[in-house]
Image: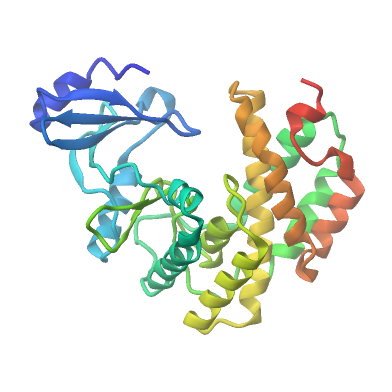
Amino acid sequence: MNPPASAPAFLVSAGWGGAEIRPLAGDASFRRYFRVVEHDRTAILMDSPPDKGEDPRPFISIARWLTQRGFAAPEILHEDLDQGLVLLQDFGDARMRETVDAAPESELRLYEEAVDLLVRLRDHPAAADIGPYSPSQYHREAKLLPDWYCGALGLHVDAQGYNDAWNAALAPVLTGHTPVTVLRDYHAENIMLIEGSESLGLLDFQDALAGHPAYDLVSLLQDARRDVPPELETAMLDRYKRRTGVGDEFDIAYHVLGAQRNAKIIGIFTRLWRRDGKPRYAGLCPRVWGYLERDLKHPALKPVADWFGANVPQDMRGDPMTIAGE
């Protein structure tokens, strides 16, 4: 993974002209990341290519909003918005995911800290310059499953029935709450343990919207990339409810938004395999199906559960690449 041709000049303008540029793992988008090393200091170079539809402005805006409120988002060291280049504070390599996997005894403590961060985030009105998590957005995301997953497997499904089922399930979730800043990808691979800091570091929040506080909690506890034990999920949901004083309506929102998010992820992961040539994402779908089926057991999701029962046979729920025989 080579850095963009403009990177050396950008680093000179940032005061890092003699730095070495080392590739880091990218993500599911066109964004790429590099570690910049100069003597005893490091930073992260984020490449958000405008010609690929990437725009670093939302990331920069939310990063500053978070830090102004005491959360640990990367400091913006330098930026060139026209080229999509941003130099960020380096949080190191200690992600919550690998830390928990290597030291299972840390799992409970770190998940408690991650839940408590969301409790604190709830205390702040949503950022002023982000859009709402609108009904049309929820529907558009949920529709990714029939469009991509069912499409990849040749399943002919009831599209109008799917839309109607989600209308019924989402109705009680869309009102009656104060919107918060929803980071939208809050999970163990986007949470950093920063050396010398008691705060958890936050990453990958450029798609933030103003929405229901249950969304980020379910993102954390129904993690598409690692198995979260059901008993831990229950304990952390109970912890959040105790600390915020929310009632049974929060349980409804949690499972409805969990089902919506998991349907979206199954669709996105299938698209990443089918369209973008990234087959490893197809292999993550069975875990997400497990979460989705757990959510569909909630009575508030009966219309959606009935749709799945009528349209997606049990033996067609899993790794779409394997099921398709590819």
Name the image quarter holding the N terminus.
Answer: top left
Q: How many marks?
A: 0
Residue 39 lies left or right of residue 251; in this view the side is left
In the image, is residue 52 above or below residue 156?
A: above
Residue 317 falls left or right of residue 281: right
- The image shows residue 69 at horizontal and vertical percentages of 27, 66
In terms of image quadrants, where is residue 219? bottom right
Q: Quadrant of residue 215?
A: bottom right
**What residue is shown at x 32% (from left), y 38% (from top)?**
56
Q: Residue 235: image x %, image y %?
A: 59, 72
Q: Is residue 173 visible?
A: no
Q: Which residue corresponds to the image point at 34% horizontal and 42% vertical from the top-left?
A: 93
Q: Can residue 320 be seen? A: yes
**Residue 91 vertical position relative to residue 13 in the rendered view, above or below:** below
58 in relation to 302, above or below: above
Residue 4 vs residue 139, the one in the foreground: 4
Observer-nearest residue: 164 or 109?
109
Q: Position of residue 273 (x, y in %)?
A: 64, 27
What residue is shown at x 45% (from left), y 46% (from top)? 98
Which quadrant of the rendered structure holds the C terminus? top right
Q: How is the image coloured?
A: rainbow
Q: Residue at horizontal 15%, vertical 26%?
A: 11
Q: Is residue 70 left or right of residue 78?
A: right
Vertical placement of 310 versus 280: above or below? below
- x and y percent of residue 185 in the render? 49, 50
